Image (spheres, grey):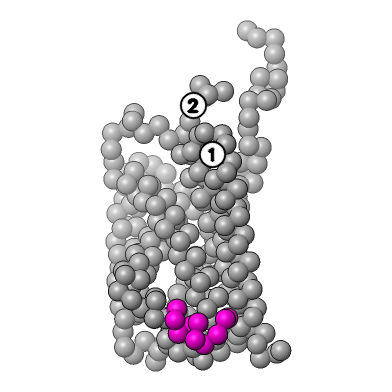
Amino acid sequence: MSLRSPLGVALGSGTAGDGVNHWWSQRVSALALVPLTVWLLVSLVRLPLADYAAVTIWMGSGWNPVGLALTVLAACWHSRLGVQVVIEDYLHAPGFKLAALLCNSGAHVLLAASGLYAILRVALRGAA
Amino acid sequence: MSQRPLSPHLGVYRFAHTMALSIAHRISGLALTLGIGTLVYWLMCAAASESAYERAVTLLSGWYFRVLLLAWLAAFCYHLINGLRHLCWDAGYGLEKLSARRSARLVIVLALASLLLLSYLFCCPYRSAL
């Protein structure tokens, strides 16, 4: 039997350290996306999508911009976490893996920022 | 370090249809990531100008994009319903082998039904009157 404590054995062997946080974050965003995506799809079904005026009026009215912003944010966050797990499972070359993880985060931040900007721009058009 | 066991070691298991659902959950999730890209593109075009939005409508209603949108709709229906199955597992329900196999069949039926319903609603000419 080794005299090293279990902590001493575990330290330095490379845990991510935030596995539980990641797990919870993925589940909570999944739960939020259930009503949000169903709402978005029902809205899209009801909208005449080829009609620019009707679509932008819908995007800017009432609680719709809030719902759209929450949907984009939750979807980007959930997607970022999911793609991260896929990268960690299948890519093992350290440098390549790090580059892929950074690209993943960057791409999702870009998506979320662009989506929010577009929603705000449509919603505040009447106010400007 | 490099000798530590890694999670997906698939060779030791006999194939069961629940495995196909598991990998399909990942694949549909990855596909939906590209779907978010299209959603954001649509939002950006609506924000830019009427002519930009009309270009987006022309692009998105081309036959190749119709096929893609249908694939994303299918990926969404499946990922949503199988995701609810995963949340049930996470809460501790339905983890036994038999109930996991039964819920797998239920997921396929519900996903197909919702895909048929949604694709009908998107193509139905009276849909804006709903």
Q: Mark 1 — on which chain does it sit?
A: A
At x 65%, y 87%, the residue is: A125
Identify the mark at residue A96; answer none if there is no mark: 1
Identify the mark at residue A123; answer none if there is no mark: none
User: Relative to A114, is B28 above or below?
Assistant: above
Is residue B2 found inside the magenta-colored segment of the image?
Answer: no
Q: How busy is the neighbourhood of tag 2: few (under 14 within 10 Å), some, or many (20 plus)?
A: few
Element at label 1: helix
| Amino acid of disc 2 | Pro
Where in the figure is residue A75, as x and y percent of width and height? 54, 63
At x 50%, y 82%, the residue is: B52
Q: Residue reaching furthest top?
A: A1
Q: Nearer the viewer, residue B3 or B105?
A: B3
Is residue B53 found inside the magenta-colored segment of the image?
Answer: yes
Where in the figure is residue A99, as x and y percent of width and height? 57, 43
Q: How busy is the neighbourhood of tag 1: few (under 14 within 10 Å), some, or many (20 plus)?
A: few
Identify the mark at residue B5; answer none if there is no mark: 2
Tell me the CA gap for discs 2 and 1: 20 Å
User: Relative to A90, is A47 above or below?
Assistant: below
- Could you tell me if residue A26 is visible in this image? no
User: Relative to B10, is A2 above or below?
Assistant: above
At x 39%, y 52%, the residue is: B27
At x 50%, y 34%, the residue is: A92
Tell whether B35 sits left or right of A36.
Answer: left
Image quarter of the N terminus of chain A: top right
The span picked out in magenta is B47-56
Image quarter of the C terminus of chain A: bottom right
| Amino acid of disc 1 | Phe
Element at label 2: loop
Tell whether B42 sits left or right of A102.
Answer: left
Where in the figure is residue B98, as x and y percent of width and height? 32, 44
Please name the predominant secondary structure of the magenta segment in the image. helix
